[in-house]
């Protein structure tokens, strides 16, 4: 009987352990958006602070950093509406 390694799912906290090491999105990966479909309103958008207390805007789905200000005017192709708006749940409080 052979030993096999089981697939392991990462929690959001584990995914964000070293966001300082991630690369930034390029201009080709983010698209301009005129509506409310922007990075800041995406289900995957989150932020954290580095060791110098500088805010890092992150996308755990792509494991990339979002340049400052781009989260207000751009989005990627994988943008999803926040589920909080649909089900009325705020997981940060729970």
Image (cartoon, rainbow, N blue to C red):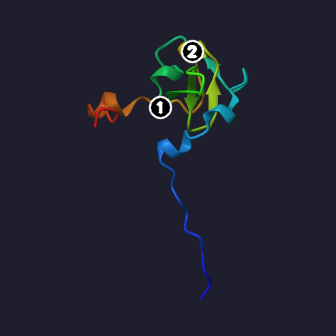
In the picture, the quarter occupied by the N terminus is bottom right
* Furthest residue in direction bottom, as rendered: 1
Secondary structure, mark 1, is loop
Which of the two residues, 3 or 44, is positioned nearer the viewer here?
A: 3
Label placed on residue 33: 2
Q: Residue at x 34, y 33 (%)?
A: 92
C-alpha distance separating marks 2 and 1: 14 Å
Q: Measured along the vertical axis of the image, is residue 7 above or below residue 42?
A: below
**Looking at the image, do the residues carrying marks 2 and 1 touch, with CB atoms under 8 Å apart?**
no
Secondary structure, mark 2, is loop
Q: Residues within 10 Å of mark 2 (few under 14, many from 20)?
A: some
> Which mark is first along the chain, 1 or 2?
2
Q: Residues within 10 Å of mark 1 (few under 14, many from 20)?
A: some
Residue 25, percent from left and from top = 68, 26
Which of the two residues, 25 or 57, is positioned nearer the viewer here?
A: 57
Q: Residue at x 54, y 13 (%)?
A: 72
Residue 18, percent from left and from top = 61, 38
Q: Residue at x 33, y 36 (%)?
A: 91
In-image side of 83 versus 17 (left or right): left
Q: Which residue is mark 1?
A: 80
Residue 82, percent from left and from top = 40, 30
In the picture, the quarter occupied by the C terminus is top left
Location of residue 55 (image quadrant): top right
Q: Residue at x 60, y 30 (%)?
A: 77
In-image side of 9 versus 31 (left or right): left
In-image side of 20 versus 44 (left or right): right
Residue 29, percent from left and from top = 69, 27
In-image side of 49 versus 25 (left or right): left
* Furthest residue in direction front, as rendered: 52
């Amino acid at each position: 009987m052979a030993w096999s390694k089981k697939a392991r799912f990462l929690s959001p906290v584990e995914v964000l352990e070293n966001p300082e090491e991630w690369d930034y999105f390029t201009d080709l990966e983010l698209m301009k958006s005129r509506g409310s479909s922007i990075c800041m309103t995406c289900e995957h958008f989150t932020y954290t602070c580095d060791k110098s207390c500088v805010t890092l805007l992150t996308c755990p789905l792509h494991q990339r950093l979002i340049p400052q200000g781009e989260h207000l005017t751009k989005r990627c192709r994988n943008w999803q509406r926040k589920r909080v708006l649909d089900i009325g749940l705020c997981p940060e409080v729970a």
